[in-house]
Image (cartoon, helix red, strand yellow):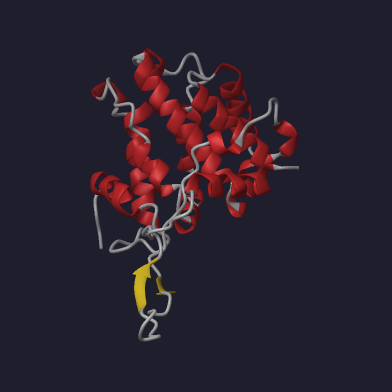
């Protein structure tokens, strides 16, 4: 399926978190095109014609940073780290510093979350921890980030890249960690019927909540602890 960069943003919202893409499969060309368009609007030739951005300008990219399959595509593009570093808005001379505070807060928070999601993924972590500009920009957000959420995401990314980077104690349960979805059929047995002794079996796809779903936030915190602890 071939799509424009604008349509790919819609697909990112709908299918970005899914490991297998659901009804849509992202390609390297689609990801590269989406990043190129975003960067052109954010600070490139189209910036003068897009003077006011929405706070959720990078939200579709956050969705793409959830799935491991899409993380691999993102990391293949040289535009990814450039866009995310600029979106952290640590450069006081960046033209987007003229945006409203609420807009800058949303964009910086999403960029920091993208880095945190990528830093928890082995292949991306290996590349990011070698990038001095990424590390310095994340440190700047930790020190002078616009919101507390952005600071926590930036420090979570730094701790995943290098556990020695932690400047303060962070409760992993307070971090907003997203998990990718896999719609894999599983068999869920029920208890035997008290009269007939028969056991009924039903199918449901993984990724959809059952009646006794666990606290996902607590589970996400445990997974993050296992990654960022030295």
Is 119 on the left-hand or right-hand side of 29?
Answer: right
Depth check: give the residue in front, 89 or 68: 68
Question: Residue 54 at x, y = what percent?
Answer: 29, 26
Question: Is residue 99 shown above or below 224?
Answer: above
229 on left or right of 77: right
Looking at the rendered structure, the number of numbered marks drawn on it comes to: 0
In this orientation, which residue lies closer to the viewer: 7 or 2?
Answer: 7
User: Is 210 on the left-hand or right-hand side of 150?
Assistant: left
Q: Does residue 130 appear in the picture of this structure?
A: no
For residue 170, say whether it is visible. yes
Locate residue 159: give its quadrant. top right
**Which quadrant of the figure has residue 190?**
bottom left
The residue shown at (40%, 65%) is 206
Check the image and report above or below for 215 versus 56: below
Q: Which percent across, then down, holds residue 91?
A: 51, 19
Q: Residue at x 67, y 49 (%)?
A: 226
Q: Position of residue 209 (x, y in %)?
A: 38, 57
Q: Residue drawn at (33%, 49%), measured in percent from left and top?
A: 12
């Amino acid at each position: 399926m071939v799509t424009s960069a604008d349509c790919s943003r819609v697909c990112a919202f709908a299918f970005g978190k899914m490991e297998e893409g659901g009804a849509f499969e992202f390609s390297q060309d689609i990801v590269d095109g989406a990043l190129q368009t975003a960067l052109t609007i954010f600070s490139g030739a189209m910036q003068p014609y897009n003077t006011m951005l929405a706070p959720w300008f990078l939200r579709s990219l956050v969705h793409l940073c959830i799935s491991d399959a899409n993380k691999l595509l993102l990391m293949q593009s040289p535009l990814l780290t450039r866009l995310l570093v600029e979106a952290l808005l640590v450069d006081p001379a960046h033209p987007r510093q003229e945006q409203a505070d609420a807009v800058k807060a949303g964009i910086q928070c999403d960029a920091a979350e993208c880095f945190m999601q990528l830093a928890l993924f082995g292949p991306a972590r290996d590349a990011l921890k070698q990038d001095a500009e990424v590390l310095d920009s994340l440190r700047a957000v930790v020190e002078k980030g616009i919101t507390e959420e952005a600071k926590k995401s930036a420090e979570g990314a730094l701790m995943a890249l290098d556990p020695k980077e932690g400047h303060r104690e962070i409760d992993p349960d307070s971090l907003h960690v997203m998990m990718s979805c896999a719609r894999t059929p599983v068999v869920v047995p029920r208890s035997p019927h008290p009269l007939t002794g028969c056991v009924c079996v039903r199918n449901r796809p993984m990724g959809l909540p059952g009646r006794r779903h666990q606290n996902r936030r607590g589970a996400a915190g445990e997974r993050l602890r296992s990654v960022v602890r030295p």
